[in-house]
Amino acid sequence: MILAALISLLIIGGLLAWLSDRFNPALPRIIALVTVFGVLLLMLDLLGEDKGWITVIDVSWLPRFGISFYLAVDGLSLLLIILTAFLGLIAIGAAWDEITERAGFFYFNLLWTLAGVVGVFTALDLFLFFFFWEVMLIPMYFIIAIWGHENKNYAAMKFFIFTQVTGMLMLVSILIMAYFHYLQFGVMSFSYEDLMRVSTSGETQLLIMLGFFIAFATKLPSIPFHSWLPDAHSQAPTAGSVILAGILLKTGAYGLIRFVVPLFPEAAMEFAPVAMTLATISILYCAKVAFAQQDIKRLIAYTSVSHMGFVMLGVFALNELALQGAVMTMLAHGLSAAALFMLAGGLQHRIHTRNMTEMGGFWVRVPRMAVVAMFFSVAALGMPGLGNFVGEFLSLLGAFQANLWLTVIACFGLVLASVYSLWVLQQVFQGKYNNSSIDESKLTDLTKREMLFFGVMMIGLVWMGLHPQSFLDLSAGTLSDVLTANSTTTVESVAVGTELVPPVLLGATP
């Protein structure tokens, strides 16, 4: 019941934060902080449990349609939920002084977004998964549309349209899979294990898989589904950018690992060269486009698309080394990107601009901020000894075994990452001090509270870089099962013929 308690805690905490605003404007953020900290403690308590499915809840919900309230946690989802709770605390810290208008409703939307994300990472009934997929999108739309910046309505609508339209494609694919289960086994079911048994022909499987892939690639995001992200990031409040970059992008990567590869093994293998090509283009193109940005948040947004390309590259390499790299990249990027957006948001909150041409020489004025920015910029470019290096190195090492030339081309993304990371540091913190268009009195250094949040994220990245095995061990069992399911189903398909044939056609009885 711990999983139901987690989601319920976030939902109830959100409602309490909203209601408390009328009594005391300071209460919502305190309630949100206590709620998310409670979620983090509950998940940390599961770290010592045995491998496999650590905890499961399966309660019939709509039995007529084969829908159940089926939640479960294994090593992979446990890592991502801990990341979610941790970055939830960081987002609350980022919003502490920034959000003063309608604070109760803001923290309500923030906690409900986190509830949806926890649901996505734990749902093993695909209808329930889609339900939580929608739950996390609507509050994020409000966060951007209400508390965003100058073009917030455009950015919020673009975010909503991209995610909703592609989400509908995923829903259609889920319904088709459930219908095929009914045809082959005589009962409706949306259960993950039941749908793993569904057999489809090669072309049909590819079309169904594309419904999932497009939805997850849009959220990742990957070219050509990425254009919503720079607008959303540049217009979102700092806390919204932290949640978007650190958590919501990871739901797309999680979907590829959890659903696309094991449910559609033949189609995933056939589509892998295309997906790896898209990943390589994302890595290089978005790194190049980042150079053309003067808005610091748009620049970081494009670098996020570039770094998440290593995740897709690792997933579709379809070997355990690359998948481990994809997971490590997800975790490390969650911390480094969240920190960079928090720094950019902190600068904007102080000097009321995101334009890097109006910055320069800030090192002398804000030395603590400069050192923190240098650390996370170096982490993002893949410095050995930090988590990002481990993730990208493993992804490329695994991808090398799958496609030599695409991996070699993708490696140039590491060179470009080094250049744009150091270029940003030069533009903002080095050179001649530029105070021509800013209020110098408001350019203050990081507070003790901000240093606490950044310090914890620094420790996390150093731990990932020096002790990656503690993370790799947690996700190893899940990734091994994903690849086993993929290889077993593929072998069975070859035994029958060149296409997967439904059991009904082979004379199997439901």
Image (tube, helix red, strand yellow):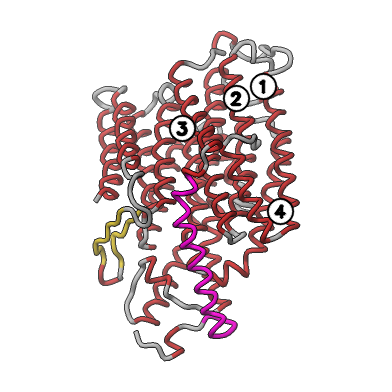
Q: Which residue is drawn at 64% across and 34% down?
A: 383
Q: In this view, does 437 lie above or below 501?
A: above
Residue type at mark 1 is: Val
Q: Residue at x 73, y 13 (%)?
A: 432
Q: Is residue 350 above or below residue 206?
A: above
Asked whether the residues under the numbered discs 2 and 1 touch, taking CB atoms below 8 Å apart as contact, a structural biologist would say yes
Q: Which residue is drawn at 59% across and 11% down?
A: 439
Q: Name the residue under label 4.
A: 407
Task: Say whether residue 132 is visible.
Answer: no
Q: Distance between the residues labelled 3 and 2?
A: 18 Å
Q: Mark 3 points at which residue?
A: 239
Q: Distance between the residues labelled 3 and 4?
A: 34 Å
Residue type at mark 3 is: Ala
Task: Say whether residue 86 is visible.
Answer: yes
Segment colored magenta:
471-500
Q: Quick one: label 4 or label 1, which is nearer the N terminus?
A: 4
Q: How far apart are marks 2 and 1 (CA)?
A: 10 Å
Q: Is mark 3 on a helix, strand or loop?
A: helix
Q: Residues within 10 Å of mark 4 (few under 14, many from 20)?
A: many
Asked whether the residues under the numbered discs 3 and 2 touch, taking CB atoms below 8 Å apart as contact, a structural biologist would say no
Q: Which residue is drawn at 64% across and 11% down?
A: 364
Q: Mark 2 points at which residue?
A: 373
Q: Quadrant of residue 84?
A: top left
**Is 176 situated left or right of 391 in this image?**
left
- Where is residue 319 drawn, in percent x and y? 58, 60
- The rendered magenta stretch, by its main secondary structure, is classed as helix
Q: Nearer the viewer, mark 2 or mark 1?
A: 2
Q: Quick one: label 3 or label 2, which is nearer the N terminus?
A: 3
Q: Which of marks 3 and 2 is in front?
A: 2
Considering the image in quadrants, where does the C terminus appear? bottom left
**Numbered badge on residue 428:** 1
